[in-house]
Image (cartoon, coloured by chain):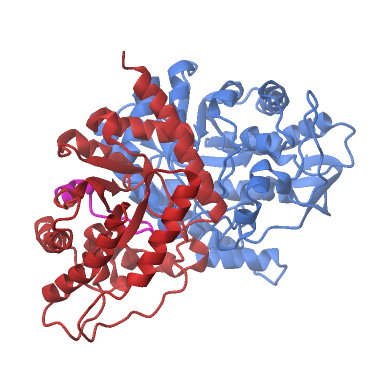
Chain colours: A blue, B red
Amino acid sequence: MRSSTDHILTSHAGSLPRPDDLIEANRAREAGEPSDEHTFQQTLRAAVSGAVRHQKELGIDVPGDGEFGKSVGNRVNYGAWWNYAFLRLDGLELGGPSLDNMTTRPARPGEIVLTNAARRRDRIRFAAAYADRESGVYMGPRPTTGPVCVGPLTYTGQEAIKTDIANFKAALAAAGVAEGFMTAVAPGSAYRIPNTYYERDEDFLYACAEAMREEYKAILDAGLVLQLDDPATATSWDMIDPEPSVEDYKKFIMVRVEALNHALRGLPQERIRFHLCWGSWHGPHATDIPMRDIVEVMLAVNAGAYSFEAGNVRHEHEWRVWEDVKLPDGKLILPGVVSHATNVVEHPELVADRILRFANLVGRERVIASTDCGLGGRVHPDIAWAKLEALAQGAALASRQL
Amino acid sequence: MTSFADRRDRARFASAYADPASGITTGPRPPSPVCTGALAYTGQQAIAADIANFKAALAAAGVAEGFMTAVAPGSAYRIPNTYYKNDEEFLYAWAEALREEYKAILDAGLVLQLDDPAVADNWDMVNPAPSVEAYKKFTMVRVEALNHALRGLPQERIRFHLCWGSWHGPHTTDIAMRDIVEVMLAVNAGAYSFEAGNVRHEHEWRVWQDVKLPDGKLILPGVVSHATNVVEHPELVAERILRFANLVGRERVIASTDCGLGGRIHPDIAWAKLEALAQGAALASRQLWERTP
């Protein structure tokens, strides 16, 4: 993984705005409308190529494929980062409840269980705002049903990931970019669906880890940087009703981190980055768990770099966590210095201020300037690209000072 | 000045502004009035009712001081005019008319807040972008008209509100605070309210490293904002307050919002932001007053 040896490198958290023709092609495919596979693949390949070129033009040093291989059939979309995995796993059957509609389950001290997403404590406190289409909290069309695990989980996405990798590597080569990252969902975030096959929750989690390991390996074998998306590490906190103790929560999450580490065994840590976030929906986020309470759990993931939100008003102050927490030797951080959480485009001087705070604490070589979360589907495409531009301009300002 | 629709930020992000799913919506837009005769203030009853309601509410809640807003002439007069001979006459007619409202608010013992976003947001409405010098000259004419309306009124109970427009757009063409801070300070007010809690203007606290706040005056920086649904963490609010307090002195900072919250974000989020504001101010106060022997 490249580090910021002579300037502050820039990257982002993954999702980028899909071009309208790709969204339409995805929509048609998802709806089961007749679609010419060859034309579709051409559209996808061209979109990835355009996105990589655009990132390079804007000054993004470590680009991604925009997650374009993860189907999005609507301009507003918050779910593709994990929904894609359901199409790449065997053992699932459609027709179960979605995350919003799963059975509610109360937690007890020492006995943490997730309730459904509609029972998130922030959603309950701000129920009227979440329900108001004009409030800007709207998350686009949400599935009412989801997959259920009914048999042994196996990875069946070999062709899909091969295509993603080929499209991305061709785009990187065409743009003359040395390093790129590709996202994949972590088991702890992926397995939050009903299961009627595995006896215990942990069996299901580890089955998911084993299955997804194949995708992780494919990305790494291709020479790319693997980014593991694992918002559940932070967002599960809000999905436990009532609020648990921090100690109980950390124990609960460590089980998931261990499963992830199991999936990563023997894989090259120096090309693995981990993405933590508190959920990218435009809600108040008043019940987000503080970074301080989960930073040790995050650092227990066997990754070489950690990406996290630090560019929105709920988490911006948490750069101070790094005054007390030591970043293990040889590891990097990718703090979010521009965010999906506001339409306002960050001023490059603010971006530079934010980068400098981190660089002064962990060392300039160990900071890659990034975004809070994926921008695609969360803000208007033109605003998303303008934010990447501001990110690169801010990083250049910070580099000059550093 | 050009039209609202021709603003440079709107032109650059036309597709985002036009997209109902982008979150930029500003609600139904009323038709604009045209000035066709001599302007005269007729709001005596309305402002009397506002004052009576507010003073009764303050008394019932046992609150000593409250503020009431009124629009400044430079922001109000941006409508078509077929009656006055030139732009400046029209502006001063507004100043004279509005002065009556300012006086009523001040005579009632309240704090008057003058809302004058045009000082900052006209910049984006001049297309193509003018030079900063030309813009300052243009804006000073409006500040002078406002000062004319304020002549003889008690400056120590007047605060001035500057902002870059509260719509949820990208705001990439906002003029820098550094370029207009002197113009703002030329307003005969005792306190200045401005945006400092959104990502386009948060870094501008540094302006006060170089600019001297005139003696006896206060600032009301925005430390929570309408620009995001996310509720500010009280520790971030405290950090923002401390930056200003360390530069201009703790006695001269009142923690405030970027802009009005009503109508810009969901009511429940608006109130939660005021709660975060108060919690953050309490945290900052603890740090600022514990340090002194």
Residue displayed at 66% across by 39% down: A215
Q: From what the image shows, is residue A366 above or below residue A70? A: above
Magenta region: B162-182
Place residue B105 in its image quadrant. bottom left
How many numbered callouts?
A: 0
Place residue A138 in its image quadrant. bottom right
Q: Can see residue B105?
A: yes
Outermost residue on the top side: it is B293
Q: Identify the main secondary structure in magenta.
A: loop
Q: Can see residue A393?
A: no
Which one is in front, B98 or B292? B98
Q: From what the image shows, is residue A400 above or below residue A46? A: above
Where residue A274 sits in the image (x, y, percent)? Answer: 56, 32
Which one is in front, A33 or B120? B120
A69 left or right of A354 in image:
right
A101 left or right of B204 in image:
right
User: Which quadrant holds the C terminus of chain A?
Assistant: top left
B165 left or right of A222 in image:
left
Residue displayed at 79% across by 40% down: A154
Which one is in front, A96 or B72? B72
Where residue A140 sits in the image (x, y, percent)? Answer: 61, 60
B283 left or right of B94 in image:
right
Where residue B153 sits in the image (x, y, percent)? Answer: 18, 55
Residue B135 magenta-drawn? Answer: no
Residue displayed at 59% across by 34% down: A221
Residue displayed at 31% across by 13% down: B293
Where residue A180 sits in the image (x, y, percent)? Answer: 47, 40
Which one is in front, B87 or A138? B87
